[in-house]
Amino acid sequence: MAEVKLIYFAWLRERIGHGEETAVLPPGITTVAELVSWLRGRGEGYARAFAQPDIVRAAIDRRHSRPDTPLAGAREIAFFPPMTGG
């Protein structure tokens, strides 16, 4: 896979320690869920940020994505906590 820009919002950014990075994903990382699992193993901040992966939302190239969404062709993947309206 080519380089992909990863963006983290709100408390994810705070726990990881930065708002964005560029990464080359290892072979076998083909879905959002697999990416989250890989990120959790990258260190304490990532593990804390993705401790409850079922509540973290993702967007691939600015389109909301499900955990089983393929990453093929993605240029930007953003992660953010659930949002409430009001």
Image (cartoon, rainbow, N blue to C red):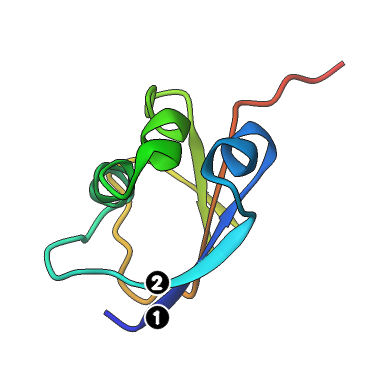
User: Pointers 2 and 1 in contact (CB under 8 A)?
Assistant: yes
* Label disc, if present, on residue 3 of the rendered structure: 1
Observer-nearest residue: 63 or 9? 9
> Number of labelled discs?
2
Q: Residue at x 34, y 45 (%)?
A: 43
- Of the two numbered discs 2 and 1 on the same chain, state the one appearing first in sequence: 1
Circle 2 packing at 10 Å, graded few (<14), some (14-19), many (20+), is: few
Report x, y in % for residue 41.
Answer: 25, 44
Q: Residue 59: where, in percent of width, then height?
A: 53, 52
Q: Residue furthest right?
A: 86
In the rendered image, which residue does mark 2 sit on?
23
**Quarter residue 26 falls in:** bottom left
Separation of disc 2 and disc 1 at Cα?
Answer: 5 Å
The crowding category of the residue bearing disc 1, from other C-alpha atoms within 10 Å (few below 14, some 14 to 19, many at least 20), is few
Residue type, numbered disc 1 = Glu
Q: Which mark is residue 43?
A: none
Residue 33 at x, y percent in the picture = 28, 43
Image quarter of residue 10: top right
Residue at 73% over, 19% down: 84
Residue type at mark 2: give it.
Ala
Q: Please, is residue 45 above or below residue 27 in the view?
A: above
Q: Quadrant of the N terminus?
A: bottom left
Q: Residue furthest bottom?
A: 2
Q: Secondary structure at mark 1?
A: strand
Q: Position of residue 68 (x, y in %)?
A: 27, 44
Q: Residue at x 41, y 41 (%)?
A: 46
Decide which of 86, 23 is in the foreground and name it: 23
The residue drawn where x is 69% and y is 26% is 83
SS of the residue under disc 2:
strand
For residue 22, above or below residue 65: below
The quadrant of the image that shows the C terminus is top right
Q: Is residue 19 above or below residue 25?
A: above
